[in-house]
Image (tube, rainbow, N blue to C red):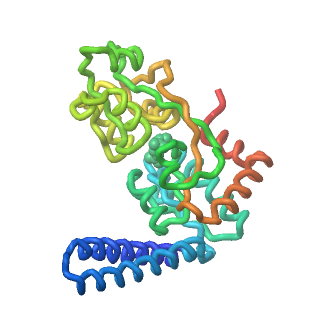
Amino acid sequence: MKKILAFVLAIAMIASVAALSACSKKDDTKKTEETKADTNVDIAKGETAAVETQALEFEDDGVLTMATNAYFPPYEFYDGDTIVGIDAEIGKAIADKLGMEFKIEDIEFDAIITGVQSGKFDMGMAGMTVTEERLQSVDFSDSYATGIQSIIVPEGSPIKSIDDILKPGASYKVGVQLATTGDIYISDDLGDEATSRVEEYQTGNDAVAALSAGKVDAVIIDNEPAKSYVAATSGLVILDTEYVTEDYAICFAKGNPLKDKVNTALNELIKDGTVKTIIDKYISAK
Ligand code: ARG
């Protein structure tokens, strides 16, 4: 599956480069140039048409490759050298149901969507929130879990809710994981001030470490990882307020028919209680 999609994208890129160079040539006044350019445009059109028909040809290589960012307990984290967690186990259960081998790749969170789009990975599963903006770039499965954006602060912090961070005149700095919804929401809410007040880190761990070190005043991150980080770090607390609630789902390249297969498997696993058992194993119901 991966190779074909990459090939298709390569053609799409060649086609658009051809189209671009054709356009720029078209600006030239010489007749001969124009004729040449028109030929190029035709070739470009032909290639684009081929791309459209080929785009749906996803080859099944028997391996389900899941891209994640494995510093997000209890959804994905390292146990020694192995990536474990809710997403890792649900992903494996889906692969088993589909009779596919299963492979997890740990990459930067902000590279998951582009990696899936380019065909490098079959799917992205990373406690990833479904957002309108992401739906422009990828397709999502049905949701298998919900998340809440929480706020972590040092014990005794004057910050009691998101309003304290957002109120006029406030200058608190907020740490987030780059390109996560926590990053997107607070950056939107702070507007122009985001540049000086939002610190983006590659992992949630890094953001929490910065909070412990006093480099930021709060961290905005999904509630379950927040609980894990706070349990592992002394002197931090999670505020008893919710910033945003959201749905987690698995993302796929647009038009990838694997999405429907995975979705069917996922729904069966939700129905027969497997997903709940996996979630309960990692999140003790309190
Ligand atoms: N739910 C948030 C989002 O989709 C954060 C996900 C971060 N996941 C991770 N594996 N690091 O943006």
Q: Position of residue 214 (x, y in %)?
A: 24, 28
Kindly indicate the quadrant of the structure image that contains residue 273. top right
State the residue in front, 273 or 143: 143
Q: Residue at x 66, y 48 (%)?
A: 142
State the residue in front, 251 or 92: 251
Visible residue check, residue 119: yes
Kindly indicate the quadrant of the structure image that contains residue 24. bottom left
Extreme right residue here?
A: 272
154 left or right of 134?
left
51 left or right of 199?
right
Q: Residue at x 34, y 80 (%)?
A: 38
Q: Considering the image in quadrants, where does the N terminus appear?
A: bottom right
State the residue in front, 22 or 234: 22
Q: Position of residue 246 (x, y in %)?
A: 55, 35
State the residue in front, 20 or 201: 20
Q: Residue at x 37, y 27 (%)?
A: 234
Visible residue check, residue 157: no
Q: Is residue 134 above or below residue 246?
A: below
Number of callouts in the render? 0
Q: Is residue 93 above or below residue 2?
A: above
Q: Residue at x 27, y 22 (%)?
A: 172
Q: Is residue 275 above or below residue 1?
A: above
251 left or right of 186?
right
Q: Position of residue 8 (x, y in %)?
A: 48, 76
Q: Considering the image in quadrants, where does the C terminus appear?
A: top right
Q: Position of residue 45 (x, y in %)?
A: 44, 76
